[in-house]
Image: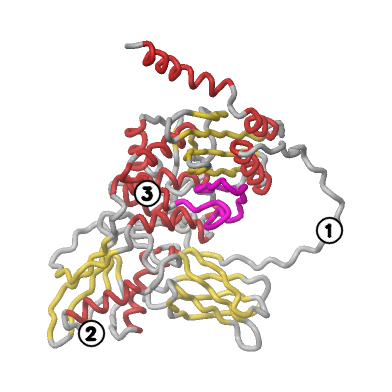
Amino acid sequence: MNLRRLALFVLYLFIPLLVYAQPYPEAVELLRRYEQRPGVRVTALLRDLETGETLVAHRTDELFRPASLVKIPTTGAFLALRGADYRFHIPVAIRGRVHEGVLEGDLILGASADPSVGSHYIPEPDRLLREVKTLLEERGIKRVTGRLLLDMNGFPRPFANDTWPEEDLDEYYGALVSGFNVGDNYADLYLYAEESDPEVEVQLASQPLPTRQSLTTGSPTNLELTMPVSRDSILVSGEVRSGSSGRHQRWSLPDPPLYAALWLTEGLRQRGIELPQAPRLVYDSVMTGLDTLGFYTSLPVDTLVKITNFRSSNIYAEALAYSLNSPKDRTTGYPIAMRDYWRERLHLTPSNFLPMDGSGLSPYGRLTSGALSLILSELWRDQALNAPFLASLPEAGVEGSVRSVSLPSGIRAFVKSGSMRGVRGYAGYIHHEGKWYSLVYIANGAITGGEARSLFTHFVSCLFIDQPLPDLSPKKPSAVKTKKKAQKVGKTKVQHSKRKGKKR
């Protein structure tokens, strides 16, 4: 080894020491000052993606609650294991005899866990209905004497992750995931109670569903929605607040495949295909004697991953993690395959990487900023993953869930946000003066969303632009007159109790 190479080698060895000797002291001081507040912890890790050097590291080995930042390893693992061009496939088949335009038998659709069927986030939410009708017409089928069957083989009955908070289970963002999802697994309710009798319109995936209603006016709104044994409509009972005029509520589906079957049956009926018998779900048995007409395919996964991260969609993230699991592991509700993938690829362990679900809704999931930074670096380094994953992250101050995050000009941040009570985080990539960096920032504890977001913007500014440190001293509340709170509209009650998964 000549002297020049030796000098470069020695310099390479000492670069980390030089970096840590001057690790952007203003930015680190900003974090430490924020941590002087009781019960507040912050972690941050900035990495140069060209050299791999760690430029700023603060509490990188400590476990933090990540909230929706878990969607980064979920979407990254799905892209890696299935590929950006992968599409979910729903087989469409018939069983029986076709005679003079009549199917003397049943119509069967297979489960695939596709999160995008009838989704609010994609165009043409009725595409599955139209394609099923087209496949039937191509076979000359104009009428069906039997019923719709959903083949749920390989998928358990719907349940909730056993670590999710009870108060989230009836919220639209806590909707159950199953082998057959529809309309993001929640229905849109439109409430009317003016001069006429109260009425509730129920729409699933932009299609009105048949209902039987027993309603009175009252305050607050208090509704119960159930499905009768006939499975041909939804029973709506309770009270609707007087004066409601198209008031909108979201109702989390207690059994997505069951309501998907009603949606399909009613949608085909409206398109001229009658299914006279009640639909049925088929679990735990292999259906035979099927004649496959064709397949409905989803949009490519790079599009679904972009929706997941732009919209921070829990249903999409959970469906991706759920479908990666083996049939046995799907009964747990935990992201077994996603966890195993990253632990094997990056030698992570439960001590630094322990997500409890695919979306981050669980308050019990934990990871270190060091582990998440390694995942971001690997997604950047892998040429097959770099472009689709970067495209899935919204730009701060411009779009998606980080539109309200304002950074100085010259700094472009493509980041995923994560928030829940006591958690605020951002993670992704920073572009400044022709260079790319990965950044992880998570605040836990007695924080408010606005303060944590403001700290993040000041932290990034301190990293790349000289700015004076903001005043982080606690503000004394100003004396204001107490205003009477507006009356809160009651939440829709769900009669069905949502099952939780098996512990593992």
Q: Which residue position holds label 1? A: 482
Please name the amino acid that badge 2 sits on.
Answer: Arg
The residue wearing badge 3 is 387
User: Which residue is labeled 2 in the image?
Assistant: 143
Q: Secondary structure at mark 2?
A: strand
Task: Tell which tag, 1 or 2, sits nearer the viewer.
Answer: 1
The answer to the question of whether label 3 and label 1 lie on touching residues, with beta carbons closer than 8 A, is: no
Dot 1 and dot 2 residues touching (CB under 8 Å): no
> 409 above or below 132?
above
Where is residue 334? Give x, y as percent. 40, 44
Q: Nearer the viewer, mark 3 or mark 2?
A: 3
Height in image: 150 above or below 174? below
Which residue type does callout 1 highlight?
Thr
Q: Is residue 328 visible?
A: no
Q: Earlier in the sequence, mark 3 or mark 2?
A: 2
The tally of labels here is 3
Distance of mark 3 from mark 1, alpha carbons? 51 Å
Q: Quadrant of residue 131?
A: bottom left
Quarter of the image for residue 233 reads bottom left
Q: Nearer the viewer, residue 368 or 461?
A: 461
Name the residue located 66 percent from the left edge and 31 percent from the top edge.
26
Mark 1 nearby-residue class (10 Å; few <14, some 14–19, many ≥20): few
Element assignment for label 3: helix
Residue at the location (27% across, 73% down)? 148
Looking at the rendering, the stretch of residues picked out in magenta corresponds to 393-420
Q: Quadrant of the N terminus?
A: top left
Q: Is residue 69 left or right of residue 264?
A: right
Question: In the image, residue 105 lies at what x, y percent?
Answer: 18, 77
Amino acid at pointer 3: Ala
Q: Earlier in the sequence, mark 1 or mark 2?
A: 2
**Of the numbered discs in the image, which one, if any, rests on residue 152?**
none
